[in-house]
Amino acid sequence: MPYPVHGRSTEVVVDTEVIVHNVRLLRSLVAPADVWAVVKADGYGHGDGDVARAAVAAGARGLCVALVGEGMRLRERAAIPETTPILVLSEQPEAELDALVRHRLDATVYTVDQVTALADAARRSAVGAVSVHVKVDTGMGRVGVAPADVAALCDAIDADDVLRPAGVMSHLAVADEPDHPGTDQQLGVFAEVVAEVQARGGAWSHAAVHVANSAAGLTRPDAHRDLVRAGIALYGISPSPAVSAAASGLRPALSWVSKVSFVKRVASGTPVSYGWTHLCEAATTLATVPVGYADGVPRDLAGRGGVVLIGGRRCRIVGRVTMDQMLVDVGDAAVAVGDEVVLIGADGDVAITVEEWAEWSDTIGYEVVCRIGGRVPRRSSVGAVEPRS
């Protein structure tokens, strides 16, 4: 839950017009498959409500979340109508299933126990049939029914008329490495399972088939099937160094900005921050920025080459990042309290990307945006959005 923040000078700004652009571009890239927007983890740190509304307005035919509570929030607070399916991507605790059914969320199933519990919840709620998607483990090794057990799981679903087959799905483990043979292997296993399921006839022959994530959506047309679950690409962030979002025309939607809170001139040899791990090599000006590791800035970002933008210039972070503040060496530049600091985003023609942060932090873009803390206010710059075609 977000912290109560009053007048903080640090914020994340999300351009929902960019989300619209990205969804429309992804639709054109994966057509005739549909796009379902993945907005779990508060929209990958971008704010799930505004992102979900923008994505649906731009033509996303469905949404995906990780938790029942995330789906509930989209229905209740973001006013996503029941006509837009919201898929919960994994099985949920039995105590959550009544809420899943009541909010007309699509369920993912891969065990007979979950099928039984879900059917019981559907009968208690008396809201009609619940849409279920069978998740098959084709090689991810995380969750999913084994291919050999798919028939038994489908039998359990067919045995109860309060459950409606809506999808057959899997998840790709190495699609962000385009040359890895594992994707071909997984797609081969998945194709065999899909053929087996569709041969059952009835609703199974019309169930949506989906396996592609963002990386496969951008690089593997043979994986598009009926729909592509677009996550990181939706936000204009590259799935990996080998799969570029920008090369496909996607644009980053998120900026992270702050303001200089203190400025001082220091002499050569001045030690900086905890542990005195940095000594100023020459007389210089240090700017304090009121954002720290409690907000999602890695404590050792300075040692990894991290920079920010002040006045359109790349300025080096120095010393250890502290919980609430960090120091930036601005050299001899004229910098004043209140000047804007860009942590992620553009300042004129100069930009710092999420991908750069990922490289500095030895991680992936997903983690960079998801770890921006809850006490950092989010603001959406919402423009006029045309209805989907």
Image (cartoon, grey):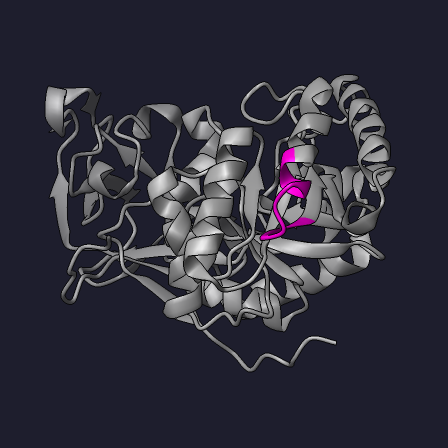
**Image quadrant occupied by the C terminus:** bottom right
265 or 21, nearer to the observer: 21
Task: Count the marks.
Answer: 0
Write the residue at 43% across / 63% down. 74
Look at the image and give the residue range highlighted in magenta: 156-165
Q: Is residue 38 left or right of residue 71?
A: right
Where does the image place residue 374, in percent across and percent down from the top left?
A: 26, 50
Q: Is residue 13 visible?
A: no
Residue 216 included in the magenta stretch of the image: no
Where does the image place residue 245, in percent across and percent down from the top left?
A: 66, 45
Write the residue at 54% across / 47% down. 107
Write the residue at 74% across / 50% down. 227
Q: Quadrant of residue 371?
A: top left
Reply above or below: 378 against 357: below
Q: Quadrant of residue 190?
A: top right
Write the residue at 76% across / 27% down. 178
